[in-house]
Amino acid sequence: MSVPAMSPPTDAALRALALSLAERMLARRWHLATAESCTGGWIAKVVTDLAGSSGWFEAGLVTYSNQAKTRLLGVSPATLERHGAVSEATVREMVAGALAVTEADVAVAVTGIAGPGGATPGKPAGSVWIGWQRRGAEDGARLYRFEGDREAVRRLTVQMALQGLLASID
């Protein structure tokens, strides 16, 4: 889904999203796991910037390479071969893998092309798949096409990942 041109969120805006998420997670006594590729752990960083995040954040896995996606999250080599790292199938396996290897109640996974390089036919820079899943529930995944430089794409990915988490737990 193309996202209308939007300004990347500020650190303060990302912090506000993380605070909202913290409140909801603590109220439910739930824990979060992240599986990140193109954001390089930025989602985990934003949530662990909050004091007391150990009360609701369990683990963050940065799986930048295909080998790490396979080894740490159980993403099938066949999925990566058939669909590529930036695909719906891969992000769904990443989010399921994050739940499988942790005791978290909720997980988010991101994989994409932050740019400026790395684009392939049909997958331009700014293409990002985000997946969310609650333990015992169906997963969800969505394709975003963000505009801007590498920093903007990564910031927007963190923002949408956190917003999607909020929506998935409400």
Image: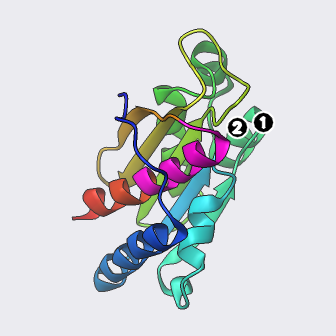
The spot of residue 93 in percent (x, y) is: 52, 37
Circle number at residue 70: 2
Q: Nearer the viewer, residue 157 or 44?
A: 157
Please report the residue visible at 53 percent of the width from the left and 90 percent of the height from the top: 52
Write down the region rendered in magenta: 148-160
Image quarter hosting the N terminus: top left
Secondary structure of the residue carrying tag 1 is helix
| Residue 153 on the magenta span | yes
Q: Residue furthest left?
A: 170
Q: Is residue 113 above or below residue 157?
A: above
C-alpha distance separating marks 1 and 2: 5 Å
- Circle 1 crowding by C-alpha within 10 Å: few under 14, some 14–19, many from 20: some
The spot of residue 19 in percent (x, y) is: 40, 79
Please report the residue visible at 58 percent of the width from the left and 28 percent of the height from the top: 86
Q: Residue furthest bottom?
A: 52
Q: Is residue 163 above or below residue 3?
A: below
Q: Which residue is tagged 1? A: 67
| Residue 56 on the magenta span | no
The spot of residue 60 in percent (x, y) is: 63, 63
Please report the residue visible at 47 percent of the width from the left and 80 percent of the height from the top: 56
In the rendered view, does 40 fall on the left or right side of 8?
Answer: right
Mark 1 and mark 2 residues within 8 Å of each other at the beta carbon: yes
Q: Nearer the viewer, residue 50 or 97?
A: 50
